Image (cartoon, coloured by chain):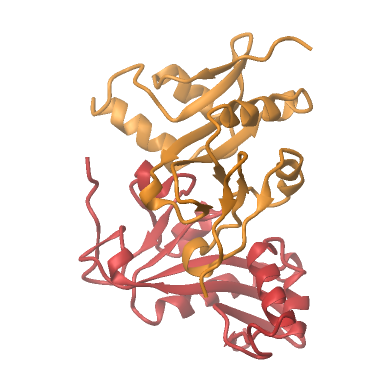
Chain colours: A orange, B red
Amino acid sequence: MNQIKVEKLLINYKTLEKFKHFKAYGNQELSMLEDLQSNIVENDSESPFYGIYYGNNLVARMSLYKVRAKYDAYFKPAQDYLELWKLEVLPDYRGNGYGRALVEFAKQDQLPIKTNPRINSQGFWEEMDFQQAKYEMERDLGQNPYIWMPAGVKEKEKEN
Amino acid sequence: MNQIKVEKLLINYKTLEKFKHFKAYGNQELSMLEDLQSNIVENDSESPFYGIYYGNNLVARMSLYKVRAKYDAYFKPAQDYLELWKLEVLPDYRGNGYGRALVEFAKQDQLPIKTNPRINSQGFWEEMDFQQAKYEMERDLGQNPYIWMPAGVKEKEKEN
């Protein structure tokens, strides 16, 4: 298999245009577009997106954001962790390990990771060594959180 | 059209069995099942779920939870609001107004409502007079929030 390279994506009109090929295009991308158009952010500014190119095509992407320890409601001890979302590989490019490469990239920092998988993608997350977090309604509401923990980190215990 | 009746669902093994027909069956339902099995909750205890029966079949459902004003990051003034999730009508029963009936039920309290629509359901929410909230990454992360506001309530302004 060729080397898969994960790149931090800079926000510009070209990248936002490529984002339109992904199913989960939504508020976040529209907000970035507005910020560019109204000069709230500069062209090529940083974004929480990482992606994989195949030639000139952006074929996989994810968003990654470090949540500060004071907001951590998932891990023990409470600590900085990564929220991962919009992990998506374009249909024609699936089965090549791009999803796995993105998740492995996210794990490099050795911070715990939390995601809210799409329906029917749980199998993938379990292969990636994620586990279902214990659901707490007040915290999770409509989410179905899955978590990954590096050595030494535990899941926070449920509050009753 | 026959009268559509929205009912508060009590949690018991029968209801949890019916939940398995819905696509968004996940952590929340599994956690309810465990709580029943380990007697953490009693049979027929209250739940955040509301549903519509057609004969003996549960054909539509949603979850609804009141978030307290101190956690409100969406509305102005900050106030109690309803988080709505897992709105779903079983495929064979779509097009009968069940989804609309559930949303109208949720609006009866005249509290603002926030939801995180599934991909491709935005059109439905717009018909229900919901609007896309301005995306804020630190708050919304992987969500694509849509909100509904009763008279006198505004969307909170974006913090920069």
Classify residue A35 by image quadrant: top left
Q: Does residue A18 appear in the picture of this structure?
A: yes
Nearest the eye: B66 or B88: B66
Residue B147 left/right relative to A3: left
Q: In this view, does A59 lie to the left or right of B73?
A: right
Does residue B97 appear in the picture of this structure?
A: no
Residue drawn at x 31%, y 63% is B72
The x, y position of residue B98, in whole percent, is 60, 74
Q: How many labels does the image show?
A: 0
Q: Position of residue B45 (x, y in %)?
A: 61, 89
Q: Which of B155 and A116 is in front in this view?
A: A116
Instruction: Please state, as top left, top right, bottom left or bottom right, where the N terminus of chain B lies in the image.
Output: bottom right
* Rendered position, A50 above or below B146: above
Q: In this view, does B11 lie to the left or right of B65?
A: right
Query: How far across and down, in percent of the image, does residue B6 sit?
Result: 57, 85
State the residue at coordinates (71%, 41%): A129
Please give the name of the residue rendered at 34% of the width and 72% of the height, measured from the top-left corner: B68
* Residue A51: image location, x then y, percent: 56, 22
